[in-house]
Amino acid sequence: MAWVNPVSHIWPIGGGKGGTGKSFLTGNLGILLAKHGYRTLLVDIDFGTANLHTVLGISHPDKSISDFVNKKVGALEETVVSTTIPNLYFISSAMNNLDIANLAHEQKMKLLRSITKLSYDYILLDLGAGTSFNTIDFFMISNSGILVTTSEPTSIENIYRLIRSVYIRKIRQELKVHNFRFLAEEAQRRDSRATENNPDFLLYIMKEIDPERGKILELSLRDFIFKLVLNQLRKEDDPNIGSLICKIIERHLALKMQFIGNISFDDHVHNSICKKMPFLHIYPYTQAASDIRRCYENIVSFKETSSFAHGDID
């Protein structure tokens, strides 16, 4: 991939595991953007378990990404559907064919290119869980993606793995396959305990072997500014845990993390999903709704300095 000419209007929203509230956050951030007058597109990239349409209160989308990937339509824009909310638009994955969960490389690149060419003020991507290449590559469509976790140890561990995987993927892309293998082998030669999953050590060695290229790589990696939202915070949870997670990741991976805020656990979220109605519409005065609005304000006030490129993608 070629990562040039940064833009700042694409927000990939991901997490290391399912059930953290990625779709919930994506949908409600989209609603707030639309209410503030921004033409906003939500794209469900959770190909295996798509449910963003339910969060938005859309029962049966009649178009999906599959129609574009399988060439039933000529342009991705043709799969866009309107919602009941002015300025808010949606591309579904709910009616996708089963095989789309494992996109071929050419299909993935075609979809990535097409997303960057869509003309909206903001585009939010609801990503699948885990660290597959497909998930990581869609997350890397922007240098300042949003991560969603809960306070559960397994969720926090998976966030760390996802960030580390993005870091490693970026190094692979910058160095190409042959050079990356050489770097990984050199790391293991110097320290038998080292693996290619230790990105900070790889960067250290690269800067030592080739200072100029190592510095370029370091600057490229520093362009990533991850944002973290801690969802489903319960009364017994430490409200500072999100900030602590950011500090730990910054220390171990030497990258920038910005804590956006907590969203309180609220049974009304479950109720809104069962009713298939947007949470902010039917429960606007709850603590969770207030938390979402605060997270939105923190995100939009943060100046995004770099993200994915228009132009050629290889």
Image (cartoon, rainbow, N blue to C red):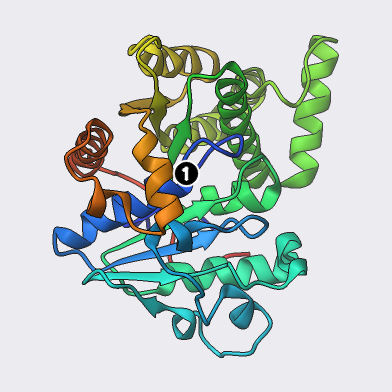
Q: Which residue is depicted at the point 38% across and 34% down?
A: 267
Tell me where residue 45 appears, x and y as whole percent: 56, 59
Tell me where residue 171 appears, x and y as whole percent: 63, 37
Observer-nearest of 198 and 36: 36
Would you identify the image quadrant in which residue 102 lies? bottom right
User: Is residue 237 rendered to the left or right of residue 287?
Assistant: right
**Residue beneath disc 1:** 22
Q: Is residue 284 above or below residue 151?
A: below
Q: Which residue is depicted at the point 52% across and 70% down?
A: 113
Observer-nearest of 212 and 230: 230
Bin the neighbour count of mark 1 within 10 Å (Cα to Cα): few under 14, some 14-19, many 20 and up: many
Quadrant showing the C terminus = bottom right
Q: Which residue is depicted at the point 61% across and 21% down?
A: 157
Would you identify the image quadrant in which residue 2 lies? bottom right
Q: Residue furthest left?
A: 36
Q: Is residue 173 above or below residue 83?
A: above
Tell me where residue 309 appears, x and y as whole percent: 44, 60
Amino acid on which disc 1 is placed: Lys
Tell me where residue 297 appears, x and y as whole percent: 18, 40
Q: Which residue is depicted at the point 38% across and 28% down?
A: 265
Q: Decide if residue 305 is in sight here.
A: yes
Q: How many marks?
A: 1
Q: Decide if residue 312 is in sight here.
A: no
Would you identify the image quadrant in which residue 41 lies? bottom left
Quadrant showing the N terminus = bottom right
User: Is residue 213 rendered to the left or right of residue 192?
Assistant: left
Q: Judging from the image, what secondary structure is the residue with disc 1 in?
A: helix
